[in-house]
Structures are given as C-alpha cells and as structure tokens.
Amino acid sequence: ELTINKIAAGEVVEGPFSVVKELVENSIDAKSTSIVLEIKEGGKKLIRITDNGIGIPESQVETAFLRHATSKITQLEDLESILSLGFRGEALASIASVAQVEMITRPADQPHGINIEVAGGKILHKKQVGCPTGTTIMVKNIFFNTPARMKFMKSTGGETTKISEIITRLALSKPDVSFKYINNNNIMFTTPGNGDLSQVILSVFDRTTFKNLIPIRGEMEAVKIDGFISQPSYARGNRSYEITFINGRFVKNKLIFQAIENAYKERLPINKYPVCMLSLEIDPKTIDVNVHPTKTEVKFHNEDAVYQEIYRGVKTALDKRML
Ligand code: ADP
Ligand code: MG
C-alpha cells in the first residue's frame, strides 16, 4: 500500500532513549491522562511505562507485537500533516526483537487483562490476569541478544541524560497529561496534567532557571506562538533550555533559534543562549517534515515570515516585561 511504502522502515531501536520515546508516544496515542516512566541503570536494565490509556483487547495483544500496517495512518495527506511519529506500526515488534518485554494490558470494557512476555521476537507466554485499566510495559536487558550493540551503549549516566531529555520534551509537549519520571527509585519530576504549560516547566526544570517567566502569546500571519521566555539574566551556556515545538512536536531548527536569539541579542552576554519554551503553530501544509523516524527536521515554505514573526513576538514580549 502506498502510504505504508512511503514510510521508511527505519531503525527504531537506537538505544534505551528511543524505546522510551516510542513507548511513551504509544501511551499518548492511547489517550492516557497519566503516564509513569521508571528506569534502572539508564534504561539498560529496565524501562517500565505504566499508563491509564485505552489498553489493548485480548484478541489484538499478539498482533501488536507483529510488524503491521498501523491503523494510525490511513491517507497520504495524514503523512504530510501528521507531526507525530507514532505511525509506523513497528516499534513494539522491533523492541521485542532486541529485548525482554513484558506487557500487562486491559481495556476498560474487559473484565480481565492479559499478561504477555516476548523476548528476542518470540512469545514466551500469555495469560489472563487481574489488573487496572491501561497498559504497563516492561523492557528489560535491551540488546541482550545482540552483544555488539550492547557494547555501544553509553554509560548509565550518558543513557540517563538522553532519556531525561526525551521524557522532558514529551511532558512539555503534553501539559494535559500527568507524567511521573522515576530514575533508580528517585522521583525526578511529576507534572500536574492540568493543561498549564507553566506548571509543567516549573515541574521539569530547576525552578530558579525559570523564575519570573515572561508569558508570550500571539497569533500572526504565519505563526501562532504560545509559551514562556525567561529573563535574559537566566541565560545558559548552550541551547539545551531553548525548547521549541511546532504543532506539538519537538524541533530543533536553525531559523527558529536565530529568530529567538536575535530578539534577545543585545541583552545576552556573549556565548550565552536564552531560556525559553515556545509552542508554535504553523500550517502543516507550509512545512516539509523529514519523515525519518529519528529526525526532527523541518523546512518552511515561507522562511522570511516565520523568522520575522517569531523575532518580533519574542522581542515585544521582552521589551514589555524586562525586569
Ligand atoms: P504504532 O504505534 O505505529 O501503531 P507500535 O508497534 O508502536 O505501532 O504499537 C503497535 C500497536 O499496539 C498500536 O497500534 C496500538 O494499537 C497498540 N499499543 C501499543 N502500546 C499501547 C498502549 N500503551 N496502549 C494501548 N495500545 C497500545
Ligand atoms: Mg507506536
């Protein structure tokens, strides 16, 4: 089928961080309002995700682990306007082929759930269990059957950093979902899930970084902006706190970075970068998105307008609210 063929069957499992990304995106797709992520040893030993979403009916549990033509995308236009990555129908299959996976899942309308274990692509067992509505998935010992890839994982600290980045972005992109992130039994953050982005920011980042947040909101010709920027005095030595989403999807885009940084320009010390969290809405028809599973690249048809509007929006907010 055309749609499916057009989607490159990419390498999904790059490491623990990509497992986290795929599984949390599945939980979001399943309409969860609460998602708990727990990792041990940078996700190399264990990644556990518990959601309260729609669950998987008993009859579909095994199929979910097969490579399939996902039902999440039906038309070519979907592909062009979709800015979510949960559309390839192969994440679970790929993950279960390189790790030991256990899933417990139950839809609300079924009296019992299913517990299934899959490792190295083989179903080890499947049985009915009592469990809450939603899905819990545990991924243990990633790359246990591919020693060469196991060797290439980073240290526990390195892998933890990558997972923290991913789960932070996902939490920021979904203020109406409550996220809890636990690393080796320590709660790293909990977000309230009440739709308030500023509360998500204060939950996931160290609060002093985002003191005196300046709200920014505006609807222009090409871009609708919503978010927060911080006082120039909270500038950082790199771009890791310069966080931007387009239509709900995390992006790193040079043009957008330049617009934001130039708006701050004379107010920032040399080699410092602003701290901000901007959620941008831009007509998907005017954006080209690289559909490679791991890429976050975008290109605008109207670069000038996008640049100017973001620049002016940020500059105006700063001018008005400088302390
Ligand atoms: P895709 O998300 O692209 O459809 P995946 O391999 O990621 O493919 O997931 C396979 C299927 O398993 C999904 O289409 C969905 O029906 C089901 N699924 C996976 N995770 C969950 C979850 N947390 N809650 C409900 N259903 C899920
Ligand atoms: Mg998926």
Image: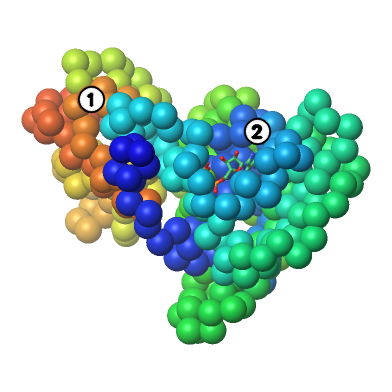
Identified at 29% across, 43% down, the residue is: 6
Tell me if label 1 and label 2 are in contact, CB under 8 Å.
Answer: no
Residue 322, position in %: x, y? 32, 30
Of marks 1 and 2, which one's residue comes earlier in the chain?
A: 2
Q: Is residue 60 above or below residue 150?
A: above
Distance between mark 1 and mark 2 Cα atoms: 28 Å
Q: Is residue 219 above or below residue 245?
A: above
- Relative to 231, is 116 on the left or the right? right
Residue 231 visible in the snapshot: no
Q: Amino acid at mark 2?
A: Ser
Mark 2 Cβ and ligand 1 under 8 Å apart: yes
* Label 1 element class: helix
- Relative to 24, is 258 on the left or the right? left
The residue indicated by pointer 2 is 32
Circle 1 crowding by C-alpha within 10 Å: few under 14, some 14–19, many from 20: few
Identified at 20% across, 21% down, the residue is: 222
Give the position of the C terminus as an image quadrant: top left
Give the position of the N terminus as an image quadrant: top left
Quarter holding residue 43: bottom right
Circle 2 crowding by C-alpha within 10 Å: few under 14, some 14–19, many from 20: many
Residue 49, position in %: x, y? 68, 50
Q: Mark number for residue 285?
A: 1
Q: Amino acid at mark 1?
A: Lys
